[in-house]
Image (cartoon, helix red, strand yellow):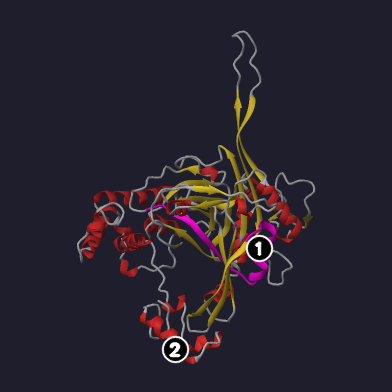
Amino acid sequence: PQLLRHWPASMSATVEVSTPTDLMGDNLQFHHIQVYVEPDSLRPLADYKKLESQLNALASRGSFDPFSGGMRFLPAGALPARVEEGRQIWNQLVDPADRRDEAEYASAGQDFVEQLLVGLGWRVTAEYVGPTTRSVLVTSADPCGVKFCVTCALVGGDDADEPYDHFRRSHVERFLTAHGGRPGIAALGFEVAEEGGVEAILAQYRKRHPALLVWHAGAHAGAPSSDVTTGKRARVDWTLTYTDVRKVQAPAASSAAAAKPAAELELGRMRIGEVFAFYTADGAAADDGTVLRFVERAGTFASSPGFANPEGVLPGLADAAPVFDGTSIPAYSDHWVSNVLDREGFLRTLEEALGFTPKVDFNAGVVAAGEARIESTVTGNTSRRLAVSGADALVNQSQVYLPINNALSPVGHVHGFLQEIGQGIQHVASRVDDLKAFIERVNNYRLITGRGFTFLNIPRSYYGRLDAPLLAKHTTCSAVLREAVCAALVTAGVLSTTGILD
């Protein structure tokens, strides 16, 4: 995950804004993402819990992060010694075979769940084990913040025995096939804050973009008779509904009286609807990769304090008793970025189906070897909740931003992504309250354990450049004025002498 800006702490407040519309985008908020990894690649839950216990033990032996106290008060030059102390303690806590040298760390080939636990201080908060897949839910310390459901296919079993559609192996196989076997973010989950919202969204897709309705391998159990079936593929465009139904036995009037029949009481309901995100290059069919998932929750499936309700993220998940060590801070979804072949087409789809509108248009300047060019537009909803403080802006998940990129040149990171992987989610970005301290925490734990994350080395030119010839190309001002503008920006420290924006 890419982590964004620091939000100052202050009193929290929210203003509700009403905007009449027949589209549901303004009622959406970030909910979860589902990541598909290689088959059978998730380790047993006991292994992850053992790692969490070791991390908790490390935190109890000293402060090696900026959040639990001592690290914030270190004298200048003391950090290397503190990190080395942490490394010595860590090597005492883990088995010799599990010790890793940070100098040999490589970001590729890592266990993604392990990286989240060690590098970010998150925890496995729930698990699902089914007949054909296994999943773990990983979150930060606030269960209302980021939610990563990591799923792998299992060997053996039959999808027909899988009670939860979102955990079917056929979906994992479909995604991996569409992405050349590469793991990645397969589903973007949004919560609809209005009853009937999921069905309203699917109605718009049926009307305007029926080709994007999700296809499943074979008919799904319970499919309505009106579904269209072609060969072994059945179009599924209804909402899947999961209910929490309990039987209540009324007491008999007397010991001699016959017991009354048990009554069924519905305590909770969760509706899930899915569509494919993108069209293929020719616009005639759905790209079989990324899915947009819409959820509507009520009763026992709705949000509740703490981590006692993982089924409110996805039905089937069971609590995994997380214990956080206080060395990290909560994270919240900020924006989710797509690389696509047809940016304007995807923007049009989101506007027609959800009412999303562009928020920012920009060209990402010269990148890499100086030849890479992309176009990017940030689209999203107009949230009905207006954050009026930094604290509320940090935790508010109702403002959805979806940057969308397409390549303009045959080189660069977006072009390479599309060529090697296909259309999909390039990265997800999360907000934290103190980014600088969070980065320090991630770096310290990588140095101590040899696990976790490194940060990208982004060239300064990525963020833009400006010089007199560029002004001549895009403005009509005189040569004297162009030179004066650049000189003033250099003097102000905004621009380097080589034209790189600082």
Image coordinates for residue 501, horizontal then vertical, percent: 43, 78
- The residue shown at (52%, 51%) is 135
- The residue shown at (50%, 48%) is 14
Q: Amino acid at mark 1?
A: Asp
Relative to 440, 485 lies left or right: right
Image coordinates for residue 214, horizontal then vertical, percent: 69, 56
| Neighbour tally class for label 2: few under 14, some 14-19, many 20 plus, Cα within 10 Å | some
Relative to 427, 161 lies left or right: right
- The residue shown at (54%, 43%) is 312
| Magenta stretch, residue numbers | 329-356
Q: Earlier in the sequence, mark 1 or mark 2?
A: 1
Q: CA distance from mark 1 to mark 2?
A: 51 Å
**Secondary structure category for the residue under label 1:** loop
The residue identified by callout 1 is: 288
Relative to 383, 103 lies left or right: left
- The residue shown at (61%, 27%) is 247
Q: Is residue 48 magenta?
A: no
Q: Is residue 312 above or below residue 477?
A: above
Image coordinates for residue 72, horizontal then vertical, percent: 26, 57
| Res. 383 in view | yes
